[in-house]
Image: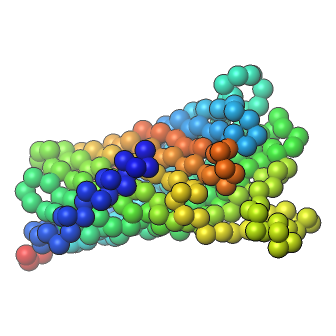
Amino acid sequence: MRIFILIFFVFLFPFLGSAQDSLKTKNFTFELLTGGVMSSFQDTKYTNVKYTGLGVVYGFDFMWRKKSIIGFGAKGIYSKEKPKTFDKGYPSVNDAQFYFKYLYPIKKNEKYNLFVGTKVDLFDFTMRINPELTNNSAYVILGGGVKAYTMFEKKINDTWKVDAGIGFQLFSFMNEYMSFGYMANQNTLEKGEYNYEDAAMPWSFTPFWKYLNIETNIRFYYKRRWVFGYAWRMQQSYQVENYPMTKGYSALYVAYRIINKEKSISK
């Protein structure tokens, strides 16, 4: 999967410099979204048991658009997960991201538009609480990261439009907490920097080969107000070699654009 994503971005580089300033409007939108989600979680450092569950997705998004696209917003989920192999232990999951996005057009014509840029997770938060566990009942991830982001956009007809985006995290700053286990890299232990009274995982620079973070988002626009979308997100931590932690979700959602202002401009 990682090789496929890298090849995808490499494939886009030949288009750089071919942008055409054909956009004749500037646009500002604000939307609210909600829908259903299926989440999953597995941490092989402790067990091979996989958890899955249903819940809700919610969020908001601001977008300014002229030639480039500038966006800011938040998206979160809440779900209750169930283990695959037994009946007790139903963790609650809260997952949220605040993000900033900038996309620049590299290919624009009458058939489709292609954008590349970045999406920055200013704050990325996950909290899992399992009330059935005495030890290690809480698992928290805090962080923020920078993704390479590509979006393809096409007008279907006068009523419908579609776009599809994919993001691949290049690096991040992560912090993982557990209520029983403690993960520290070998250098931290050898330097004697471990604090037994406050066993918190120190913030660390994390490249993509240590923390894989991929997301996709497909959106169908109906007229001026309605958006129907599918979002998928997967994160995988390799802090302990050969024992990854994997979490993610798939979501179907609907969004309503409370504000959709458009103004014609000269070419």
Where residue 86 sits, quadrant-wise, is top right
Relative image position of residue 217 (x, y in whole percent): 37, 48
Closer to the camera in the image, 137 or 169: 169
Query: Residue at the location (82% across, 73% down)?
Result: 191
Instruction: Looking at this view, name the residue that lies furthest to the right.
Output: 197
Relative image position of residue 78 (x, y in whole percent): 60, 44
154 vs 40: above or below:
below
**125 with respect to 99 (left or right):** right
Instruction: Looking at this view, name the residue that lies furthest to the top.
Output: 86
Query: Residue at the location (26% across, 50% down)?
Result: 163
Where residue 262 sits, quadrant-wise, is bottom left
**160 with respect to 129 (left or right):** left
Query: Residue at the location (82% across, 69% down)?
Result: 190
Q: Is residue 226 in sight in this rendering?
A: no
- The quadrant in which the N terminus is found is top left
Relative image position of residue 267 (x, y in whole percent): 7, 75
Closer to the camera in the image, 2 or 20: 2
Relative image position of residue 172 (x, y in whole percent): 55, 66
Closer to the camera in the image, 110 or 209: 209
Query: Residue at the location (59% across, 44% down)?
Result: 247
Closer to the camera in the image, 174 or 79: 174
